[in-house]
Image (cartoon, rainbow, N blue to C red):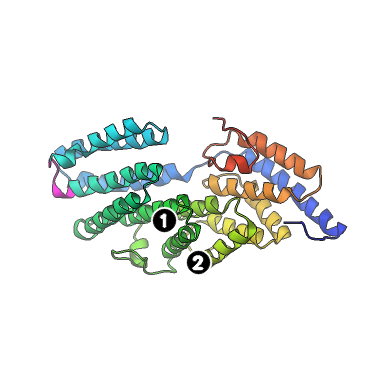
Amino acid sequence: MLKMQLSKHCFDVYNELLETTLKHYRLGCTKPIMFALGKYGDLFTHTLYMQMKSRLPQKDQVLMQQAANARENAVMAVRRGELVTAERLFAEARVPLESNSLSPESRLLHKSFLEQAEAYLDYHNGDFDRVYTRTSVALAIDVVLEKEYGYEILHIHRIQLLHNLVRTEARHMCFERAIELASQLLAYLEGALEVLPFSGFWGSEYVVRQPKEVVAATFAQITSEVAVILAGKNPQLASSLLAVFKHNIQLQAHGSHHGHPRAYAWFLLKEAFVGNDIATFLERASHFLAEGRADTPLLWYATVVDLVALCSDFDEPCKRIVKQEVALNAASWKFLPQRFFALLGIHSQVG
């Protein structure tokens, strides 16, 4: 990035900014993660659970809880690579559907979440066509549950299902399609896009009915997916992908009231990084890193990845200090994406 001819004054300014950024990085390292997923998941689940509790027969609630436990254990088994166990648990979770022991409403609810969970196994196995098929089924079910049974909270579940397709496209190396869909989802959440290119009813009036905390957390999660996709990409590809992104969403200092402040802050510093605006990137990254991982650890980690990449073009000893400190600290960071280890100069995952 700095392989151009620069004056000694420029290098001195950049090194000074880098030293400040390193100090703020150290400060941010000491602050704990306040991961949004727990709060978001709890609020989403509680809202859905309370509605189910008020509507569904007690017998159905018991059966669905048992099936949900099997489903969640199956997903954990997939994450551990225990695929035979996962298949067995998914079969156990399907029993209430196959035995017709649930009411039509309960059946729809259970099938939607089961299709989503089994799509994760398909994703793990690289069966992307099957991921799309299951996701389409779950989306169609959610539309029925929203329109005919009044489950408004499932509008955000539809966004989450489409978020899973962003991840799927990225895994399939279709980065432009992944970024295009992610940008559409974010534009929709912030009210800049009224309709998404998928069947079902859409509109900003459905988003504003969702809990603001859930919308903000969803916005941050999708932004984090974008950050993971862009991390480590060569400048030309990263610039091209960011251009696709900016076609659908405007990067503003504070964004709309539907989004997440740190997500917007990350977009702006990433824009500076991709645009080779080194001084602006370091200034923005300095503030961002000082705040710590907070409730968006993936955005913080992606910023550190860019900082390490930038340091490769700086003079010793500053770049050596940055790389060594980051490699030492990052070995124990929670929720750090696996592919970030190599980008941060870490040879093996710890913890």
Between marks 1 and 2, how big is the CA–CA gap? 16 Å
User: Residue 274, relative to residue 65: is it above or below?
Assistant: below
Evaluate whether residue 280 shows in this view. yes
Q: Amino acid at mark 2?
A: Ile
Pick the quarter of the image with the C terminus. Answer: top right
Report x, y in % for residue 222.
46, 54
- Residue 19 within the segment the image draws in magenta: no
Q: Which residue is located at x 46 percent, y 49 percent? A: 171
Q: From the viewer's perspective, is the residue at label 1 or at label 2 nearer? A: 2
Q: Residues within 10 Å of mark 1 (few under 14, many from 20)?
A: many
Secondary structure, mark 1, is helix
Which quadrant of the view contains residue 45? top left
The range drawn in magenta is 100-106
Query: Residue shown at 68%/41% (left/top)?
Result: 26
* Residue tagged 1: 215
Is disc 2 placed on a helix, strand or loop? Answer: loop
* Image position, residue 335 (x, y; %): 51, 39
From this viewpoint, is residue 258 visible? no
Is residue 138 left or right of 242 when viewed as pictured? left
Residue at 20% in and 46% down? 54
Q: Quadrant of the N terminus?
A: bottom right
Residue pictured at 47% horizontal, 63% vertical: 180
Task: Say which of 349 and 34 sits in front.
Answer: 349
Q: Which residue is mark 2?
A: 249
Image coordinates for residue 22, horizontal then vertical, percent: 72, 45
> Where residue 128 sits: x, y (%)?
37, 50
